[in-house]
Image: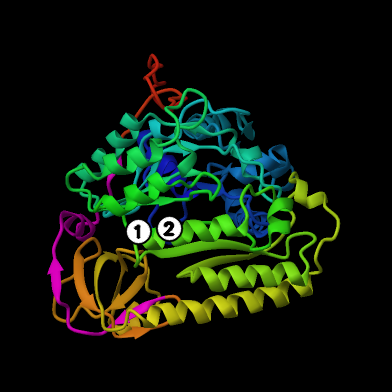
Amino acid sequence: MNVHDSERLAGLLEDAGYARAEPDAQADVVVFNTCAVRENADNKLYGNLSHLAPARRANPDMRIAVGGCLAQKDRETIVAKAPWVDVVFGTHNIGSLPALLERSRHNDEAQVEILEALDVFPSSLPARRESSYSGWVSISVGCNNSCTFCIVPALRGVEVDRRPADVLAEVRALVAEGVLEVTLLGQNVNAYGTGPGGVGQGAFADLLRACGEVEGLERVRFTSPHPRDFTDDVIAAMAQTPNVMPQLHMPLQSGSDRVLRSMRRSYRSERYLGILDRVREAMPHAAITTDVIVGFPGETEEDFQATLDVVRASRFTNAFTFQYSPRPGTPAAGMGDQVPKEVVGERYVRLTTLQDEMALAGNRELVGTEVELLVAAGEGRKDVHTARMSGRARDGRLVHFVPGERAVRPGDVVTTVVTHAAPHHLVADAVLVGHRRTRAGDLHEAGARPRTAGVGLGLPTVGAPSTPVAAAGGCGA
């Protein structure tokens, strides 16, 4: 979601007359779009700002802007710690960036603008997309959950849904630009349509099916659902809509029912495993990934063993594992029984070791099978040295393959055979079975990146369209 916000910021700046700086060039404007989910984001931001201080002193016309969740949280603190920062803006007013930059130049002083509620839906802003073949599409912003470890609701606000027509209009606009794959984004995608003014349960499944009718759209993914709201109609829509990929990211967080209760996660391990069983019954080859937090306050060895048990039963393709760190402003930060760091670290190693073993076992089952890949750019760190390229299979697995004598480009589609497995990727050193050149590949080869205008005005909700609000001109509202 932050990456997609950065695409919006790039589109806004281009509209205001800015051009992207060449690699290794000294930029006139540097924008940090920050996250606040983990503690190291703070350290990384202030470290990077310190590195830029000499350049800012040497060039009084240079401008440094900080936005996103950390800016929403820290506000004036950023300028106090780094007085060479010129602009601070929050999650609710990214459209204000160009105007704030100009104001900081005119007034020759820092501009801090943090709104408490969304003024313009981000998708009504232009975007310069990073990929010629794959695009993000927000279906909602904000979150109505109250997980005790999470700072996001305080920084992103309550959930606001887009109208289905606006979502589909953006999907079609991307496909018209050559994009083959879209990922639907929301803090809790399967709560889409269930808020005030919504059309009720089933809206997200209907949206998936509608994406299946978009001509030229080959792959649809989404992230992230919440186990509490995940219903069988979504499973049916996934299984019955050919371009919805057999991939599901289902956050677990903990396998202990006691810890889940303390996290204020409104499901228990039995319900969670039941969802996975029904997904695999409908899509036997679905790849399921997850998030797990180790060392939540009060977690005992028994609790941790329960997490290991659920991980074993779930057979995840991959798991994003995190060592708990207190986030100021969250209920969990003030809880007693904080687990010692050395204990958290030891448990983390045991969890990742188990997950790697299970992921490797699952990947080995695919050796000898045929996979269709959407070729990606920059996904394989060793591709230059191994003469391979990389792509994503339909189930989301990363596959490094040998293109041979074929002129394969990122954005093309290839079919190959898996020859080797590792915990986090597959290798296909066989001769390509097929190679389809695509318009997305043509655009990537030409160095063209899609640009989409804003879709939808004001603050839309699911259901009957409201009267549109006129969009602000120039730099945005």
**Any magenta on residue 169?**
no
SS at mark 1?
A: helix
Residue 300 visible here:
yes
271 or 136, which lies in front?
Answer: 271
Real-space Cα separation, disc 1 to disc 2, in angstroms: 6 Å
In the drawing, what numbered circle is on residue 151?
none
Label ID, residue 278: 2
Please tell me whether residue 269 is drawn above or below residue 20 in the rendered image: below
- Choose between 396 and 455: the one closer to the eye: 396
Residue 186: x and y in percent read 47, 43
Q: Percent x, y for residue 283?
A: 34, 61
Task: State the image quarter where residue 104 is shown.
Answer: top right
Residue 203, image x, y percentages: 39, 35
Q: Residue at x 76, y 72 (%)?
A: 301
Q: Which residue is mark 1?
A: 282
Kindly state the secondary structure of the residue where label 2 is placed: helix
Q: Is residue 326 above or below residue 209?
A: below
- Is the residue under label 2 in contact with that under label 1 (CB below 8 Å)? yes
Q: Residue placed at 40% from the left, 75% from the top?
A: 381
Q: Which residues are magenta?
A: 425-452
* Residue at the spot 78% in from the left edge and 68% down from the top edge: 300
Q: Is residue 454 visible?
A: no
Report crowding for label 2: few under 14, some 14 to 19, many 20 or more residues within 10 A (C-alpha): some
Q: Amino acid at mark 2?
A: Arg
Q: Residue 10's quadrant in the figure?
A: top left
Which residue is more in the foreground, 310 or 61?
Answer: 310
On screen, 453 above or below 196?
below
Query: Horizontally, is 203 left or right of 321 in the view?
Result: left
| Residue under the point 28% across and 82% down | 387
Badge 1 density bin: few <14, some 14–19, many ≥20, Cα 10 Å: some
The type of residue carrying mark 1 is Ala
